[in-house]
Amino acid sequence: MKVFGEDLGIEFGKIRVIEILSGDPAWEQERVTYESLLAGEEAAEVFNGQMTIDLDLATAPGGKTYFTLPRPVMQRLIDGRTKGLVLRPLGSMAATVYASENPGGNGPVLHFSTER
């Protein structure tokens, strides 16, 4: 950190949540790669660079990580205008993020608040 500054230490080991705005609309979960998702477009056109959330993953085995999506992003997800979210590691890490198909109910869950 002395050489690169404090910013390196702040982000290292976190994950970044990014909204997917476009890309290949017919990607297959079993075969998708970064390049195939981009479908020839620039990453800046596919991913919403303004909608990023940096967070630490839970450290305990089986722990849960929570984050709040901004209202416009949630609305685009509901309307089908957003293709989804991508989790990108920031730096080196050893972690498991379960898919929704994971047996045992350990996959991601969206919680909605209907209060205004």
Image (cartoon, helix red, strand yellow):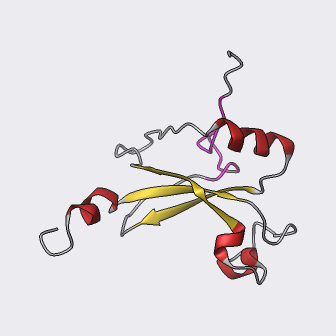
**The one of 71 and 54 positioned closer to us in this rendering:** 71
Q: Residue at x 64, y 53 (%)?
A: 99
- The quadrant of the rendering that contains the C terminus is top right
Q: Residue at x 71, y 69 (%)?
A: 46
User: Measured along the vertical axis of the image, is residue 29 above or below residue 19?
Assistant: below
x, y percent for residue 90: 41, 65
**Residue 96, visible in the rendered structure:** no
So how many labels did they put on this image? 0
**The one of 20 and 49 positioned closer to us in this rendering:** 49
Q: Is residue 44 left or right of residue 80?
A: left
x, y percent for residue 50: 58, 56
In the picture as drawn, the residue positioned furthest to the top comes out as: 115
In the picture as drawn, the residue positioned furthest to the front comes out as: 50
Residue 109 falls within the magenta-colored stretch: yes
x, y percent for residue 75: 76, 38
| Region of the chain picked out in magenta, as a range | 99-111
x, y percent for residue 27: 82, 70
Q: Is residue 65 left or right of residue 22?
A: left
**Residue 65, visible in the rendered structure:** yes
In the picture as drawn, the residue positioned furthest to the left comes out as: 2
Q: Is residue 85 left or right of residue 79?
A: left
Q: Is residue 56 left or right of residue 24?
A: left
Q: Residue at x 45, y 57 (%)?
A: 15
Residue 116 falls within the magenta-colored stretch: no
- The quadrant of the rendering that contains the N terminus is bottom left
Q: Main secondary structure of the magenta part?
A: loop
Q: Residue at x 39, y 44 (%)?
A: 58
**The one of 96 and 48 positioned closer to us in this rendering:** 48
User: Measured along the vertical axis of the image, is residue 50 above or below residue 106?
Assistant: below
Based on the displayed image, in which of its 4 quarters is residue 40 positioned? bottom right
